[in-house]
Amino acid sequence: NKMYIVDFKTKKCNITAISRPFRPRGVIPGAKFEGEVVIGAAAIPNEHVNVLAFSGNFTGEAYTGLVSSPDCFPIQNIHFSQKYGFEQSTYYDLKVGISDPELFIPPRECAPPGY
């Protein structure tokens, strides 16, 4: 539950607590199915994508999510809350798997002294 912010000019790392809730990607629990659309040329293999739309309004937070079908890759997530405002995330060129798991290791600038 830490956030690492690195100034690449000074190589200084600022470690802080995460100040907002984690936003899951894809369909969030309790979301309602709204419909399905096809983007692209539906009759041509590999030239279209089926998109499922979901939404929800949970204790003052509105959510809309678009995912591919049948793989459930996130395409777009939109959240709105009074506390944090509007957040929109759109995804492109996604691939299955993690090509470089080292990216999840905090940079060496953030290592504790003597590490």
Image (cartoon, rainbow, N blue to C red):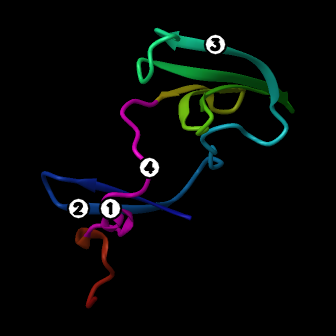
Residue at image mark 1:
103
Q: Residue placed at 46% from the left, 8% from the top?
A: 41
Quadrant the C terminus occupies: bottom left
**9 relative to 48 in the view: left or right:** left
**44 relative to 17 in the view: left or right:** left
Residue at image mark 3:
37
Q: Earlier in the sequence, mark 1 or mark 2?
A: 2
Residue at image mark 4:
96
Q: Earlier in the sequence, mark 2 or mark 4?
A: 2
Q: Is residue 75 above or below residue 104?
A: above
Quadrant the N terminus occupies: bottom right
Q: Residue placed at 29% from the left, 62% from the top?
A: 13
- Please state which amino acid type lies under the numbered disc 1: Leu
Residue at image mark 2:
12
Instruction: Name the mark nearer the viewer: 2 or 4.
Output: 4
- The answer for how far apart the CA atoms under marks 1 and 2 are is 18 Å
Instruction: Name the mark nearer the viewer: 3 or 2.
Output: 3
| Location of residue 32 by image quarter | top right
| Location of residue 37 by image quarter | top right
Q: Is residue 105 above or below residue 112?
A: above
Q: Earlier in the sequence, mark 1 or mark 4?
A: 4
- Please state which amino acid type lies under the numbered disc 3: Val
What kind of element bears circle 4?
loop
For the residues bearing labels 1 and 4, Cβ distance under 8 angstroms: no
